Amino acid sequence: MHAYLNVEYAWLRPYGWIESIQHWPTMWHMEHTAAEEWNGRFDRVRECLRSQMQRVFESGAIPDLCPDGSARRDWGGNNQFFFREVEHYIKMTGDLAFAEEAEPFLEKALWQSFAEYDPVGSGVIGWGTQIGNQEDFESTPGKGAATGIEGVRMMEIMSYIKSILGKPEEAEFYSAEARRCREEWYRTLWLKDLGRPAWYEDISGELRLETTYHGITYPILYDEIDDPDKASALDHLLHRMTGPEGEIYQSNHFGDHAYWGVPTWGMQCGSDMQPFATAAYAAVGMKKEAVRPLSFIARRVCGSYQRGSWPETANEKRFAYFSPSAAVFSQAVIESIFGLKRDMLENKTVIAPCIPEDWPEASLQLPGVKISYTSRTNGFSMQLQIEDDTRKIIRVLCPPSLRVTAEAEGRKWALEPELHCGWSSVEFEAGSGRNLTVSCSWEPIEIRCAYETAAACGDPFSLLIEGDAELIGVEDRCGVFSSLEWQNNKLTGTVRRDLLEKYERYGWFGILNFARRMLFLRLRAGGREFLHPCVLVSLPAVYCRAAVAAEQNSVLVEIWNQSEKALTGGWKLLIGRQLLTAEGTVLPKQSGTIVFPIRSGEILFSPGKNKAALQGPIHYPLEIEAAPEHAQVVPIPIPDEACKPSAYWREIGLHPSHGHMMQGPDFFMQGLWEQYGAIPILPSVPLSLNPNGFLPFSKEKHPIVTISLEGRKMKKLYVLFSAFIDNHDVFSRIFRAEAEAVKKDSYFRPVYLYDVYYPGTADMGFGNAVIAGFATYAPDTDRSEVPAMPVAPGETDYRQAQPPAYPQRSLWCKNRAIECCNTVFNLLELDFGEFKEMKELRIIASEADAAGGIFALAAHV
């Protein structure tokens, strides 16, 4: 009733539904139409869609409407919503006359979308802000996961419209285009090792690896990927983008989820996105998971504060009466939980309930529809009152089962369900009567997988299948194992050593975020074969860090050993041209410290990080923290003529998709040169600012920046930079630093390479005051913390990997950081291992929107 009233209050005839009668008194995305159709308000839907068509822009773009009936265009547009709404209305009504009326508007809007968001004709579209809803800070400036699939779906809907209007050749053209777009989407974005798509590929061909909630849910809702891929993609949604109450978050792209705030900007658990998670879970029969996002929002709506008002975001303390979310909530209850779908052109109504077995009963009442559902062990019964003569198709979603029995109005069926990948489904036609009693039951296949979920890279792995199924093979499409064999229902193998290698560059955030991988067991039961998903949480075999203990005249190496092997024996530590040795043991799945005495002479250390190599039971590249008393570190001036004034950051650092995120751009670098002559990020390292400004780098305007080092002899170069990046740059390489030494007698040019990744070795350069509290660095963050490893028996995942706390600011960057005057600086430490005559430093911007400034240099000479 609350959802109904929120939508009813918002209706403004004939234009549509006001978004929020409290504080957004105009219209944006018309997500209300499906719920209103189930409420019998077909006249409203027609009026709304016609109002948009009457005011369509000359380009073909579908408008937002104002209360006075005038048109405008906000965010990335409304074309994708318009397509969904028209298709849903036509199927609900069978209104071919309206399909004919809408056809030219759909066709023009389709090609307008591809012209705007796929200018090179790749077949994979991007989008401006809000490919979904409540994403003011998130756009897709490249070939995108959610956006590309929306492009595929728009092509499919266009094909459908042409088909029902009797235009088969045009229908086939759009169907072929949809296939082309889908294949290109998969080729461009699918991350085979993770079993899910990347977020987008930018115009430079660089991927952003961590996608959004609709990058996962839309391909499932539109049935564009196969069953194992659905299982692996949803695993990430469930275990890295879902909070303790089952709420899902729009993305992990920001330094905070604003759980207690009101933003609907692209990082939050907004009320509009929960129903899409419900629909995706329902599509694969995940019944308990499907109801939790809706329950989360329902508790807020019915709580003591909102008292029926629909919030935009979970815990906001204002009365939004946010009508789009109320509408899609209703649609999810009707179409996902009760599984009600109608297609008047095919004369059918589908009922596919996705109701948890621990719900004893549930009921739904709509104009012309009444469903009473009763659960029972391994089955259900329903009383259906549907006031039309459509064929009533019952779709049963259940665990993997060999047999489903059904009964309706005296007829009985013994059905063999389709075995998917962790669930089964089967359909039968119960008749076309208006009052039906239906009962279904299934015989689940008992499948028990006994194994330790978490395993270190390179470790042996074993899994035992118990129950009714026989293990006959494995599909390792994510490439989790270097070897596998199976017999007698036991799987043994070895986890690949390099499974996390390409994600470790993103620091702890990368290690935790990309830890979960999926293995698919090929099972046989009752003469039938099927795939069954099993998850593996991959852990780094070891993690090491080191520091000089001057008072002990030694180097301490801390080792976290996640492997099953004891690390014992003789250890060697190579530092430049000197060797330290030690004896010691670190037991399996424990941590320990190896002490390397410095026995003779002095080792050349620079302040901060020093390059070293650990050998012995393991081989590990190390950085040793040191604070030598007598190291001579001097500033390296940045040439005056190369500097740009502070205001220049706006020309290279205002990302084309920043949108509202720049809440306080005037605060960035405000008073920096007046308050600081040097940035105190590391004691004894003088990082002096040039009073003329900073040295800019930018993929678009300053792709390669060269700084002469004039052949000066140095052991280490310190580069103080601030990255003008935001949430759209997450999980990408920002720039490469090339430090070139004087050639002398070497056969080829001696160039030291250092790649800077975000997250991992860079933060957003903007402080919280600049970007509304979403900075990745905060001064009170302890970045020395090592995440608690899930190595104890029975531990199945990282404890801290759950929003809204995750991703914690401690995970974002391992390099030193400091905030001065709302500007976050990172320190890049380039250690050459010995004194070298250095010719020059080059900064080469990598991804399409990479930009930043070099603010100071220093060298250990």
Image (cartoon, rainbow, N blue to C red):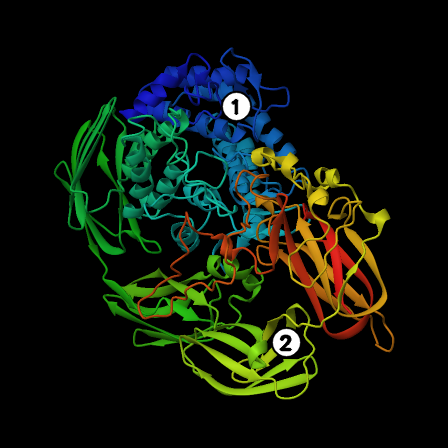
Task: Please provide percent x and percent y for residue 638.
Answer: 81, 54
The residue nearer to you, when weighing 592 against 68, is 592
Disc 2 vs disc 1: which is toward the camera? 2
Q: Does residue 438 appear to the left or right of 748 in the view shown?
A: left
Number of marks in picture: 2
Residue type (three-letter) at the residue carrying disc 1 = Glu
What residue did someone put label 1 on? 103
Q: Examine the rendered structure and indicate whether residue 547 appears above or below residue 43.
A: below
- Residue 627 is left or right of residue 518, and the answer is right
Q: Tell which of 696 and 546 is nearer to you.
A: 546
Left or right: where 167 falls relative to 286? right
Name the amino acid type tagged 2. Answer: Ala
Q: Can residue 439 be seen in this snapshot?
A: no
Q: Contact (CB < 8 A) between labels 2 and 1?
A: no
Residue 292 visible (yes or no): yes
Q: Is residue 753 left or right of residue 271?
A: right
**Which mark is on residue 455?**
none
Where is residue 734? Give x, y as percent: 66, 53
What distance separates the C-alpha of mark 2 from that of mark 1? 67 Å
**Which quadrant: the C terminus?**
bottom right
Label 2 secondary element: strand
